[in-house]
Amino acid sequence: MRTAVFIVWLLTAALVVPSAGQEAGGPPSMSFDEALAKLATYEVGHDRAALISLQAIVYRESASPEKRKTMETAFIKFLESNATRAGKDQVCRHLMLIGSTASVPVLTKMLGSEETADMARYALERIPGAAVDKALRSMLPKTKGRVQVGIINTLGQRKDNLAVPALRTLVTGSDAAVAAAAAAALGDIGTPQAAKALADVRLKTSGAVRAEADDAYLRAADALVARGDKKGAFAIYKQLSAPGEPEMIRIGALRGLAVSGGKDAVPLLAEALKAAEPAVQAQAIRQLATIQGPEVTKLLSERMSSADALARVRILAALSDRGDAAAQPVFVNALKDSTLEVRLAALEGMGRLGGRPAVRILAETAATATEAAEQNAAREALNRLTGEGVDEAVVAGIPEGDAKVRVELMRAAAARGTSAATPALLQAARDPDRTVRREALRALRDTAAPSDAEAIIAVLRTAQSADRREAERALSAVLARSESAPVAPVISAYQSETNTAVRASLLQVMAQMGREESLPVLRSALKDSSDEIRRAGILALSEWPTPAPMPDLLAIAKGDSNPAFQILALRGYIRLVGLPAAGRSASATAALLEEAMSLAKQPDEKKAVLALLPKFPCPESLKIAEAAMKDASVANEAKLAADRVRRSLAQR
Amino acid sequence: MKISRREFLAFPALIPATALGKNGAVAPSERVVTACIGTGWQGGNNVNSILEEPGAQLVAVCDIDANHLKQALETVNAKYGNKDCVAYRNYEEVLERKDIDAVVLSVPDHWHGILSVAAARAGKDIYGEKPLAHNFAEGVAIRDAVARYGRVWQTGSWQRSVSQFRFACELVLNGRIGKVSKVEVALPGGLLDWDKTAHLDKPSPPPPELDWDRWLGPAPWAPYCPARVHKTWRWNLDYGGGLLMDWIGHHIDIAHWGLGLDNSGPVEVEGTGEFEKVNSVWNAPAKFRVFAKYPSGVTMQVSGGYPDFNFKLGTKWIGDEGWIWVDRAGIDAHPKSLLTAKLRPSEIHLERSPGHHRQFLECVKTRRRTLTPADVALRSATPGYLGLISILLGRKIRWDPVNEKIIGDPEAERMLSRPMRSPWRI
């Protein structure tokens, strides 16, 4: 079996699509004549070389009228020969692509046999020209059963309007499969004549044929719309949407009414809103939603009072999708609905269409909802509200009022990135109510700019101990947002601050910023007289974004008098060893980790070292892991690390 | 008060109380009554996904392979702790059941068109696997039938339900990387021999558990051989479209989503491919490159199986102010600050999904469009259909995305559809 790769790509080349001309299956290994001769004895399962060559040639040459003609002539002779069926099947595939009316006689002959009819149609169906249609029609009375069904299907696909009379007759014939196919083909053809034929015979059928005829009639109406005959189509849709027609046909017709009639369809769709079948109601709602205008909004809104719960959900969804802000009172009213799903749909609609008036309502709903889903929906709606004055309304509600509502508005300000809320949030960060303070500090992370840093530092310096961590996070988040954020105010505050806890927080902020100019400050903290500051310094350096403070931490890990600081520093050191370091080889890193391992006294630090080893696969890393396997406290982790390192080394 | 499903489904038959799952929190009468058609491989995954949804009750499974069917039935029965689920060999029987609201279709591509249209006509809402259809014309038929009968359709393009893909697309749509000039889409390549059947490509009697003639369905007749069926059917162009079409509903769908091309398409498509197993029933390109140009001038370069784009699978949009890359493995961007960017309310927000199957079930109730409706899936698949034609014919295809026609190449136009074996039709 040939499994060669036929097209060689220059893997190093930039991605450029090569010029067209790469054959399917690669360049042919034999000539057209040679391949065709071999195809004459081809059987499925045999060597496919001839098939492949032939396909490549046909595909490649299909753009040339002359080559198509030459190939087709040869194919016609082939089909007239005693070649195998499998070979002829292949030729029919090619004629599907390049065949012309010249192929019609031989293919038509093949339509007469059940064995060859399918592949003959395979070719004929895609060959253009009235001669094909004529030939197919001529075979209708000469065939039956599955072959006839196939021909009918093909006539439908070809939209042969001249086949309408014959198909019309077949729809009421005795063979149900043929009748159903004929009905379907009339729908495919979709001309006014086909639509009329279906109108004439549809009600004379029953069972599966009727179902096919109904669908075909609907499709014929769709085809009329596509042709521009909306009036003709509307009449059909009106007929098919009437009670008494099958439910799915009514549903299809309701859509047709909206598409073809627009506002003229509203009375009929309004009638369908009252249908007993929920699926019909649902379609009426959806189709009404596609029609613009205040009368539809009014119609759907009025329907809310008599609709069941699910229909109310669907009406609200449709009103929301329509985007008519005039529907807002419906959403507000539905917030009081006894059914949760209805309230959720109303909140979603409020979020889309509510505008400024919805701010207070949504905030209050979020603050008072007892169901988590409802609270989340209200928050989501508040976060998404658009329109003039929405942000202003959010900000205006922050300074005073019910604490829970204020908290919701602050959450919204954060989610919306409302920078105008920052002054109000800074004020709220000093509110007597702790929940308000906490939420204000959280919201500042998203609303404040680096230029607000000094104001946040001021909050941090006066914050109660319970709020300090939030203030620190807010300051870090705001300053981390910009690489050019000034670190000087933080350093200055640290140096002038006397409160140890505040100084510790500021060290952490400096670590999060990771700016070179604060590194000396952090190093000096390691020598501070206060153990609390020393500890904060170790933690801050452990969080540093580059390996720069590794020597500082290693020194503490090796020789500090405080064992707890030794452990903290070692953990930080191990973390920094794991950071990317330009120019350091895996072996060099392994040496650093080996030293860390030698300093580790507890399993946690040993495990941290072992977890890093697979990131630096080298024999030295493997050696460290294998040695640790003898340590019962970390044997499992060591084995896992060794396996991973080995696997990486093997892949090389 | 909760909505009773019977308030919106007029079917008189109530699901028996025993249908309630062992630990189900949602009463059966409130669930979307669902059937899974096609239960092998991806079909099995979908069975499991539906079983995990409290809002669905899986009442029927269907497969023309008796072994797949048996396994699926056992899975459902074990989950629900009863034997209420019914097994069917023929999909027609499933579609006839009036109590079934939704079907999950996980069948080979060449069956998508017939089955989807039949399901739409029967009034079922549909979760259908990607690609939308085996070929463009069948995709059109599905799109039209779904619209005609007002059905809810979710394509198995589940990446749209994953937050990192949504976020990446939101950033692109909101201009965070400036004017986008091109998209790079890297897909896997190869003709993977999952079941070790590559060598079993000689005609042999079909196994007793498989209805072979029905499996072939509308495809040209061919004798059974193991290499044609189950998983690897996708390597034969009569039934699938290789990895290009297998992934078209994922990374290319995402590329389109980010570019706002859910209602448009390329104007030019040019492809090349390698056919590693040419002397086999596996005749799909194992490696491929497809280049598509869109009306705005944006280009998309799809690479399957090649070491392009630094070996990184996924979708990467490149703009004049940065780039964004996203894959199942993660998201990356330049500048990095994009990764923590927040969208303002006035910016484009794509729908957040509670999970792909769940979003479908929610839409069944609300009658809203899903994240991946049929018309969108067709747009996403179109570069693949055209790319495959270009690969086979070895020439560039020009496309009219408004009228959805090939321009100036009547022979290529013929390849947009495939005639069906009788008696099958859409």
Image: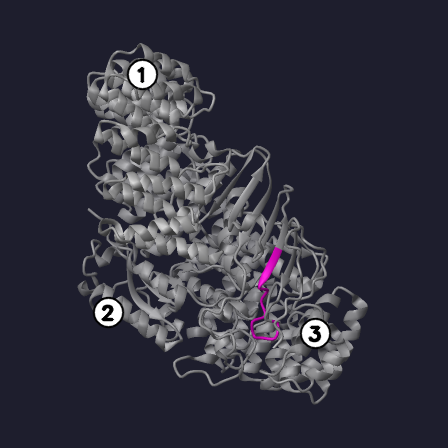
Question: Mark 3 highlights which residue?
Answer: A53
Residue type at the position of mark 3: Ser
Q: Which of pointers 1 and 3 lies earlier in the amino acid sequence? A: 3
Q: Position of residue A632 (x, y in %)?
A: 22, 52
Q: Amino acid at mark 2?
A: Asp
Question: Which mark is in front, 3 or 2?
Answer: 3
**Relative horizontal placement of residue A439, taking residue B287 as reference (left or right):** left
x and y percentages locating residue A627 in the rendered image:
31, 51
Q: Which residues are magenta?
A: B278-289
Point out the image quarter for the N terminus of chain A: bottom right
Residue at point 63%, 54% (across, down)? A11
Q: Position of residue A442 (x, y in %)?
A: 30, 25
Q: Are marks 1 and 2 on the same chain?
A: no
Q: Chain of mark 1?
A: A
Please rate how many residues cluster around mark 3, counting C-alpha atoms within 10 Å: few if below 14, some from 14 to 19, many from 20. many
Neighbour tally class for label 2: few under 14, some 14-19, many 20 plus, Cα within 10 Å: some
User: Which residue is labeled 2 in the image?
Assistant: B84
Name the residue carrying label 1: A426
